Image: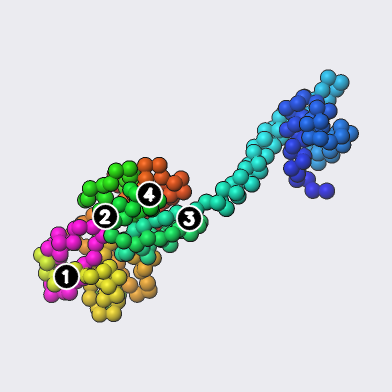
Amino acid sequence: MSDTPNVDDLRLVLAISEEGSVGAAARLLHIAQPSASARLRSLENRCRTVLFDRDTTGARPTSAGSEMARQSRHILGHLDGVFAATAAAAHAQPLRVGTFVSLAPSLFPSLELLLGERVIPTVSHGPDLLTLVGEGQLDAAVVGVADQVPLPRRVRVTTLGRDSLHLFRQHDTPGLGTGRRPLAERRVLVATYDRSGPEVLERLARLGAHAEPAPTLPTALSMARYRSVLAVVPRSALAHELGEGEVSERLPFQQRITLSLVTGREPDPRIANAASSLGQWLHLQPTR
C-alpha cells in the first residue's frame, strides 16, 4: 500500500478535526463508523504517528493531526476548484487583440506563449485600434501612438515600456563609420511605430545618410537582407526576427518609442496578468 494519502484519507482527517469525533465524521461522509476507524488506523500506521487522541468523549487532533488537517483543507480546496476552473476554461472566449502590422510578427507569438492559449488577432492602424477597443470590439490593443493622439472614452492605457531604434544589417554589410558623419553616403530605410519618422530622417541626414521612409517595416528588413542597405527599425520588431548573420546595433542618437497596452476600463484578467511580462518579451526598456 502506498504511503501517500488519498483524497478519502484527507476528507476523513478534515472531518474528524472539524466534527470532533470519528462517529460524527463518519455520518458526515456517509460511511460506517467501523470503516472510518479502520481507515484512520491504517493512515496512522502509514504516517507512523498518532493523528488523534481518542476516548469516549471524542477525538482531539495531536500536533501531527492538526498539521494534516491544515494540509488537507488546503489540498481539498484546490481539488474542489478543478472542475470549476475546467468548466470556465472550456467556455472562455479567446482574447481579441489588435496591433499594427509592423509589430504583429513579434507581438502575437509572444502573447500566445505568455497566455498559453490562442488569441484572435486584428491588424490595423493605431487610431483605428483605439476606436475598436473603445467600442468593445477588441479586448486589447498594443499601439505606439497612445500618447500622440486623442484617446476614446472608456479605455485604459498601460505603458508596456520604451522601445529604441536600432540599425539592422547583414554582418557583411558595413555598419556605422567614424567621425561626425558615420553614415556618409549610406542608404538607410526607416520604419518606426509612431509619428517620429520625419524627425528620425532629419537626424540621419545630419549623420550623412541618404535616409528615406520605408513603405512598411517588413520592406525595410527585406531590403537590408537582400539589397545590402541599412534599416532603422524598433528593437522590438526584431524580437523574433534576428537570424544568423544579422546584426542589430544602437544608433549614435537615442529615439524612444513608447508602446502601450490599451484595454477597456475593466480589462480581462488574462491580458492584465500578461501585461507585466509582455514588455520583457518584446525587449522593451521599463519606464522610470
Residue 224 sits above or below residue 73 on the image = below
Residue 147 position within the rendered picture, expressed as x and y whole percent measured from the top left = 24, 49
Compare residues 141 and 67 and report the one nearer the observer. 141
What label sits on residue 212 in the rendered view?
A: 1
In the rendered structure, does residue 196 fall within the stretch colored magenta?
Answer: yes
Residue at image point 85% right, 22% down: 55
Q: Looking at the image, how many numbered discs can be counted on the residues?
A: 4
- Point out the tag, 1 or 4, that comes first from the N-terminus: 4
Q: Earlier in the sequence, mark 1 or mark 2?
A: 2
Q: Tell me the amino acid under the disc marked 4.
A: Gly
> Disc 1 versus disc 2: distance between alpha carbons?
24 Å
Distance, label 2 to label 4, CA atoms, is 14 Å
In this rendering, the label closer to the viewer, 1 or 2: 2
Q: Residue at x 23, y 65 (%)?
A: 191
Q: Nearer the viewer, mark 1 or mark 4?
A: 4
Q: Which residue bears the numbered disc 2?
A: 127
